[in-house]
Amino acid sequence: MAARDYFKFRPRLKKMIMEKHNEIQSNNDIVVIEGAGSPAEINLKKNDIVNMGMAEIADAPVLLVTDIDRGGAFAALYGTVMLLEPHERARIKGLIINKFRGDKTLLEPGIKMIEDLLNIPVVGVIPYISLDLIDEDSLIDRNKSPKAEEQSFEEEELELNKLSNGIRANMDMEYIYKIMGVNNG
């Protein structure tokens, strides 16, 4: 779809997304929405329906995740939050540092500083977890990937369990449940 056609279609698309989200929400206790790219791209924000735009449609709290493996994680968190409008910032309930390698105590001064600067808690530091999974961006080319053909469902399930266990062990899950309005007791 050409960009010009997309912009004409966008109002209808937004309505369709809202209807589908409401349907999914009515049939599930929890709905997790993953964004794509940066929520603060100032040249794209006006037409955003996948990041803060979707969070607004769903009236959802937001956890902002940064990839420390690429470097500049604290700058990325700060810059992203500061480029958001005040009503968007208010949606961000927690910060997550992903793919950390090394001694977590070395991050503590930076975590304290970013929490003080943004008044948003860091709710998780997830270690780099080596996984034998197909890259998420290649899932649509699953039939073309030799790895996909070689890996059984059971092997994929083991890797996904390894991922979920690693995340759960390194997140403040009580806080996550609280912002979701879920009683974990």
Image (tube, grey):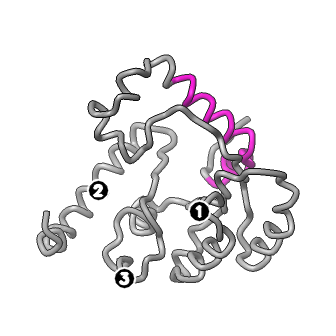
Residue at the (59%, 62%) spot, across then down: 64
Tag 2: residue type? Ile
Spatial separation of the CA atoms under disc 3 and disc 1: 20 Å
Q: In the visual, does 182 lie left or right of 13? A: right
Whether the residues at callouts 2 and 1 have beta carbons within 8 Å, the answer is: no
Residue at the (67%, 50%) spot, across then down: 176
Tag 1: residue type? Leu
Whether the residues at callouts 3 and 1 have beta carbons within 8 Å, the answer is: no
Query: Magenta: predominant secondary structure element?
Result: helix
Residue at the (40%, 68%) spot, across then down: 53
Quarter the C terminus occupies? top right
Q: Position of residue 161 (x, y in %)?
A: 60, 28
Q: List the residue tagged with mark 3.
A: 43
* Secondary structure state at the residue bearing disc 3: loop
Q: Nearer the viewer, mark 2 or mark 1?
A: 1
Spatial separation of the CA atoms under disc 2 and disc 3: 22 Å
Q: List the residue tagged with mark 2.
A: 17
The magenta region covers 157-179
Q: Nearer the viewer, mark 3 or mark 1?
A: 3
Q: In the visual, does 162 lie left or right of 173? A: left
